[in-house]
Amino acid sequence: MVFLETSGGILDTLGNLAEQTGFAKLGWGNLLMILVAFIFLYLAIGKGFEPLLLVPISFGMLLVNMYPEIMYKEGQVIREFADGTKEYAESTGLLQYFFTLDEWGIMPSLIFMGVGAGTDFGPLIANPVSFLLGAAAQLGIFVAYLLAIVFGFNGKAAAAISIIGGADGPTSIFLAGKLGQTNLMGPIAVAAYSYMSLVPIIQPPIMKLFTTDKERKIKMTQLRPVTKLEKILFPVIITVVVVLILPSTAPLIGMLMLGNLFRECGVVKQLTETASNALMYIVVILLGTSVGASTSAEAFLKADTLKIVALGLMAFAFGTMGGVLLGKLMCVLTHGKINPLIGSAGVSAVPMAARVSQKVGSEYDPTNFLLMHAMGPNVAGVIGTAVAAGVFMAIYGVK
């Protein structure tokens, strides 16, 4: 009798322990998302596709699909039973605190400061026409906005999705938070960062499709030297002009230009190093991991997610096409002085998109050096995407 009671107690204990393991809560959706996380890790580590972003994103994805509680909010309904009763989360998960900073726009703004501190705006200052190429590459954003509405998304959701076309993860997260589309933030951010990492694969076929062999071989003249005064005045002037026209862009444009002013003024070397290195990498870890953790099977495996991924790809393709086509027009107007390939760098994946322009150009002429010329549209694309986000916030009355 004692043996039976003891064995029954042991079995109950083992049963309770089994119910507490992650295996008991794994569904097919979780297994699928774990597989996706492994694929992203392979792309990041094995193939070197934007590892600084994909490693934390994929690991966050892995964590949340094994331990959903890591993204719960205290008081959140986590389970509903057949009798109508509900189970609520007793505490807030670790990564939910990080994700809240994403929703508030803090992480994306700090990323912009780091980008500004680590980027030379000289090529854009030396060749202001690059602003036009950066603007043309925003075509994808507005095409995707219209298509998203056709696909059944409301205006705010369509705007948040369309920013993927700028190939700018931080701006995508920032706008989704400002427009109250946090339920779509996971798929939007993952799509944006995935396409950023896949720039070397997605862009070249589009660039080659819309340019001729002769155009791809065009050599551009060396950019003029830019004075220190110009570099100091540029971030100040851009901030004043853009923020006065679109005040809602202040968090992004302001931090981008503040970081660049740190870099160019020459008197705050410590701030420049901190913003472009230590702070930047800390924020990337927190933002990437929390974004990845927003992709639980429940939140991610929906029809809307597939639509967002498709719309993001179309937006990115149209953005690349818009930059290249304006580059072709400028090539004609300047009698062959501008290589259309640099127009593809107008998407704001800095500096990867500029490197792709250089790579494609050098395939046809190894002596052709387009990198610095492509950096102009690339930097302009960062500004252009932030402005596009500001336009949407103005349209929907968000400050």
Image (cartoon, helix red, strand yellow):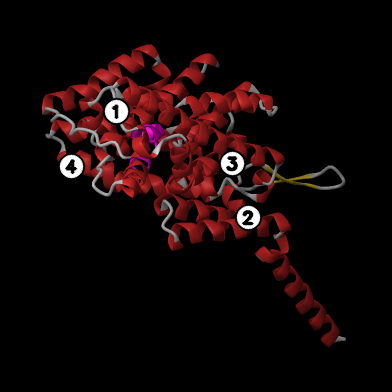
Q: Label 3's element?
A: helix
Q: Amino acid at mark 4?
A: Gln
Q: Amino acid at mark 1?
A: Gly
Q: CA distance from mark 2 to mark 3?
A: 12 Å
Q: Does the image show residue 67?
A: no
Above or below residue 244? Residue 289 is below
Is 395 situated left or right of 29 in this image?
left
Instruction: Give the residue pinned by disc 2.
Output: 33
Q: Amino acid at mark 2?
A: Met
Instruction: Give the residue pinned by disc 3.
Output: 187
Q: Which residues are magenta?
A: 342-354
Above or below residue 312? Residue 36 is below
Between label 1 and label 2, give the one nearer the viewer: 1
Q: CA distance from mark 4 to mark 3?
A: 36 Å
Q: Label 2's element?
A: helix
Magenta stretch: dominant secondary structure: helix
Quadrant into which the N terminus falls: bottom right
Between label 4 and label 3, give the one nearer the viewer: 3
Asked whether disc 4 touches disc 2, contact meaning CB atoms under 8 Å apart, the reply is no
* Residue at the top extreme of this rendering: 245
Q: Nearer the viewer, residue 215 or 140?
A: 215
Is 176 situated left or right of 246 in this image?
right
Q: Nearer the viewer, residue 277 or 379?
A: 379
Above or below residue 46? Residue 240 is above
Q: Nearer the viewer, residue 148 or 283?
A: 148
Mark 1 closeness class: few <14, some 14–19, many ≥20 residues within 10 Å: some
Q: Amino acid at mark 3?
A: Pro
Instruction: Give the residue pinned by disc 1.
Output: 336
Q: Label 1's element?
A: loop
